[in-house]
Image: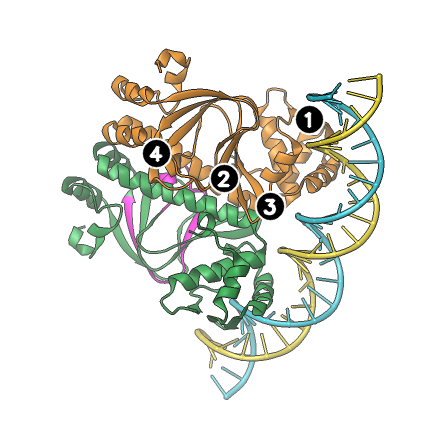
Chain colours: A green, B orange, C yellow, D cyan
Amino acid sequence: MRSTDIPGIRSLPLFSDIGEDSFERLIRGAYVQNFPPHTELITEGESADFLHIVVSGTVELGSSWNERETCMALVEPHTTFILAATIRDRPYLMSARTISKARIIMIPSEDIRSVFENDSEFAKSIVEELAGCYRDAVKHAKNIKLRSSVERLANYLVRQASQSSEGDRISLDIEKKKLASFLGMTPENLSRAFTALRNHGVEVNGEQVRLNRPEDLTRFARPDPLIDG
Amino acid sequence: MRSTDIPGIRSLPLFSDIGEDSFERLIRGAYVQNFPPHTELITEGESADFLHIVVSGTVELGSSWNERETCMALVEPHTTFILAATIRDRPYLMSARTISKARIIMIPSEDIRSVFENDSEFAKSIVEELAGCYRDAVKHAKNIKLRSSVERLANYLVRQASQSSEGDRISLDIEKKKLASFLGMTPENLSRAFTALRNHGVEVNGEQVRLNRPEDLTRFARPDPLIDG
DNA sequence: AGCCCCGCTTGCCAAAAATCAAGCGGCCAA
DNA sequence: TTGGCCGCTTGATTTTTGGCAAGCGGGGCT
């Protein structure tokens, strides 16, 4: 693979600060691939042969136990997944599947480990990325342990709105079913949670959600940078 | 501080592989301190000036939101806490307080970051430790999202028993109140969960728990290395 | 020793969330 | 076009969990 095969790869957070030789070494063994939606990329419990980086599209990380399943994270472009398994050479704790069409870089775990040892800038990037993943996992757990389902939905909406350019209009870009799972509730319960938030000016129309009284919703949600940040 | 001040410090996972000069550098700015039980060591939201390492005793990591509080992790000797905040130079996501008397090493965050850049063995140890923390956080979230409260308790007991030398006798070394919070339920609910597990041979006597039919309990709990490992 | 505080338990009830069932409506394929 | 599948919603009901109150009992303090 030539590095020019992937426009913008050099500016990924993980690569932006590293030396040219380290970069070449990582790129040499790497694959880039386009996947259709709903493709299982990795399976919980398997061993971690590649580090994955999302270039475009969205990837879901999910876990299951005893016939139950839950969505643990939604991975957006420019970040990695299953970095921890790669580093510790342990089985994946989560499965990964594409939600939309997705373009993904895969780098052999051994290459990651060997470049890590020789390039302290890369090591720094890796550890920053990993620390970020860790903090996200902690936030996810806090969200679920400390808030009710309606509160989780409210905060999700407030956050989406703050990130959207549209101001108080949100387009849920994932199935409600999936959103429910991510927020730790059933689809039925998510429907009811949306209904409950009508009192705070939330108006739902299929994928489109409008926050008619954003201040009201925010006051109810009480977003916290240490959970939602 | 002299390194001889802390017996065994050199064999901590974080230090066992690093060079003597790196070690000296880390130790130079470090403090060791003994804390009484129930002492707040760090507070959620503050900035991360020190990496903490538990030498002896137990430390609780907890988080709060909107008057609610939850125990996120129990840190045992030889591991670190708030490593991620140290590395990213971000505010703590969790508070830390001692549960028992505890002996703790504190190393300035800057020292960690600078030695990290110069000693790839140390970098490797740091990233392994961090990956371990991340995996623990993911497991915690899976545990809570995928299991009911009774199932969580059952698995907790099975795991404790497997780690204990006593076979099927367990001594809960933390308050039930705290255990309840860690397992994501109220103290009342924990009591009821214990009662429910009588059907599977669980007998409680204050701090002492006996598993009279371990196979039965295990069959009910369905422990999973990707959650309980 | 006696008192009080606090952790734990239990009963009772309320709230939250899951489950079951039915119906609507869009989308895809025959 | 039509049939069937699937995602979503809503209602009815159950299960799970939480909250409140009362009582028990151990440990520390006066």
Q: Quadrant of residue C5?
A: top right
Residue A94 within the magenta-colored segment of the rendering: yes
Decide which of B205, B34 is in the foreground and name it. Answer: B34
Q: Amino acid at mark 3?
A: Arg
Pair 2/4: label in front: 4
Query: Disc 3: which chain?
Result: B
Q: Which residue is the site of mark 3? A: B147
**Do circles 3 and 4 both sit on a common chain?**
yes
Q: Which residue is the site of mark 4? A: B127
Q: Residue A157: x, y in percent?
A: 48, 62
Q: Which residue is the site of mark 2? A: B226
Decide which of B123, A148 is in the foreground and name it. Answer: A148
Q: Amino acid at mark 1?
A: Glu
Query: Would you place residue D3 above or below residue A158 in this image?
Result: below
Q: Secondary structure at mark 4?
A: helix
For the residues labelled 1 and 2, say whether their Cβ atoms are less than 8 Å apart. no
